[in-house]
Amino acid sequence: MSTASCVFALHGSTVQAQPDLSRRATALGRFLGLDGVAIRHLPALRLTIGRLGPGPPLDGASLIWGAPWGAISPSNDVVLAAGDAALRGQVGMGCTISWSEHRARLVTAPSGPVALYTAARGECQAWATHATAAALIAGHDVEIDWSLLPEHLAYDFVGGGLSFVRHARAVEPATCVDVTPDRATSRSVWPARDRWALVSEADAQRHAADALVASLEARVARDPQPTVMLTGGADSRVLAVALDAAARPFSAMHWGEDGWPDAQGARRIAGALGVPLTTSLSVRVDSEMIEEFGAQARWTDGGALMAPGRRVWPEGAGPILLGTAGEVGRAFYYRSVSRGREPRDRSEVAAHLQPRLRLPGAGPDAVARATSRSAGWVDDAAHSEHEGWRLLDIVYAEQRVAHWGRIQIPRLEAALIAGFAPVEVMRGLVSLPLESRIDDGFARRFVEIRRPDLALPAPSVPTVPSTGLRALAGRMRTRLRPVPPVGPDVLLRALWAERPVTRSWVTDYVLATPIAADVMGPRWVEVTRAAFLRGDPRAIA
């Protein structure tokens, strides 16, 4: 139950093709920095399964990446026999590959970061936990789809089921692929309309809270002491308080220096709960950073957000809890404009994603690409049958949590727990009244009930005004819609301080490559270089 490997499957393979597949897998292991290749060919199924990196032998145990089943590891027989209801019962993130001699099944968790990609070539179809692996195992050369660069630069990820790797697509959540010798048949075991069915606003707080507590128990029940990645904010505080209320021993960790406000907040929370807290900030030396950018980009299929920092993870096998998906219930894409008129159709919803304002200096083609792609996210979210602000909450869950969240997943032996990602938790968060979604209402009430001494500060956003005032505010804001705040980031500034070699590489090589100007436009290159040289690391990060 780790993310320290890459697992894959190839349908349509033959015995004669095995030597070439083995060579590709070995090359892929070197590319991803993984030692060890385990491959098993199932001739009756025309299926090959494999793993790069550490793990048990490929015998009777399912291949599991992440911890989709919580604290348990089901056998091949259990997964192959599972009905849709059992498959919907997955509470963690990840994917599973199970097989017998005559049948196989690939299953993705119902929610959370993307865990499986697929690519096809001719009669062969491949699946893998990395987009690069899916394309290469299917028989393609690895190519970057540079047309997706504007989307990535605007939102920090490529969404809409795609990846930076040409030919590879993300497999949807709650997908079951049944493999027989003749075909691979894919279906959804939990359609979006049902996953996102609202509970009543009056019951939403209780629904989300009960689902969170139950899912945490299922995800940490049999594991050693877990570690909460703690900040001074709302989401990780809720996780810590939930474990404390359940009398579950745990420790806490914070990436940062003791004097930083967020680290001080984490220390105050840990002290009140009586749990040990470790704070650390390990910064790579300048000479290591360029190589690390490459390694992270290869591991994340194009993302390298934290290359300057060396993530120090807790020792031991206990699960690590992250506040992932908490902002599904915190109006991430519309908090600052929620007092205006609620968007009435998909085009107005998509306008709040603000692609133009996120790409200062970008050419019209780049802006058009980002605009089209983000509008597609809204169209995808409309399958939930929601509208208005809630549609943006679905976009956050299905795009940012799924795709940006995937970029954040490290190579780690311990189980990663995406705290708020289970479907029933997010369904409750989306169902909250608007007032609760814009003032951290879920976290505020959850903590106040259980640990009033750790209550969150007063809301920074005023309560929702009357309908008439909201309409007036909406008209006034139409031309002055603000960009989401991206102010000084103490962590990023610390990571980029005193990096002359890497800074020169960014300005003189990365931004000077012809592809940057061709795709984004010369003006974008100038604006980005100037901002980066002024000391704004977000200009390039």
Image (cartoon, rainbow, N blue to C red):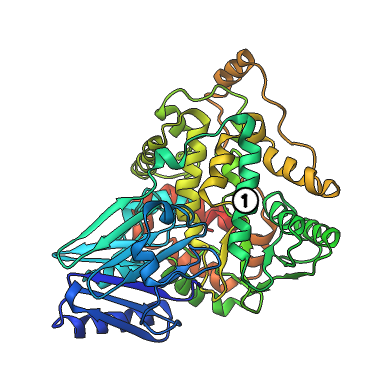
Report x, y in % for residue 459. 75, 36
Q: Quadrant of the C terminus?
A: bottom right
Q: Say few, some or many: other residues with alpha carbon within 10 Å of mark 1 (under 14 / 14 to 19 / 20 or more).
A: many
Report x, y in % for residue 410. 52, 69
Q: Identity of the amino acid at label 1?
A: Leu
> Would residue 332 be visible to someone looking at this image?
no
* In the rendered image, the vertical position of residue 174 relative to residue 17, given as above or below: above
**For residue 26, side relative to residue 45 (left or right):** right
Q: In terms of depth relative to the viewer, which is nearer, 359 or 28?
A: 28
Q: Quadrant of residue 482?
A: top right
Residue at mark 1:
212
Q: Residue at x 66, y 34 (%)?
A: 436
**For residue 108, side relative to residue 209 (left or right):** left
* In the rendered image, the vertical position of residue 251 relative to residue 159, given as above or below: below
SS type, badge 1: helix
* In the rendered image, the vertical position of residue 179 relative to residue 433, given as above or below: below
* In the rendered image, the vertical position of residue 340 relative to residue 522, given as above or below: above
Q: Quadrant of residue 76?
A: bottom left
**For residue 209, side relative to residue 106 (left or right):** right
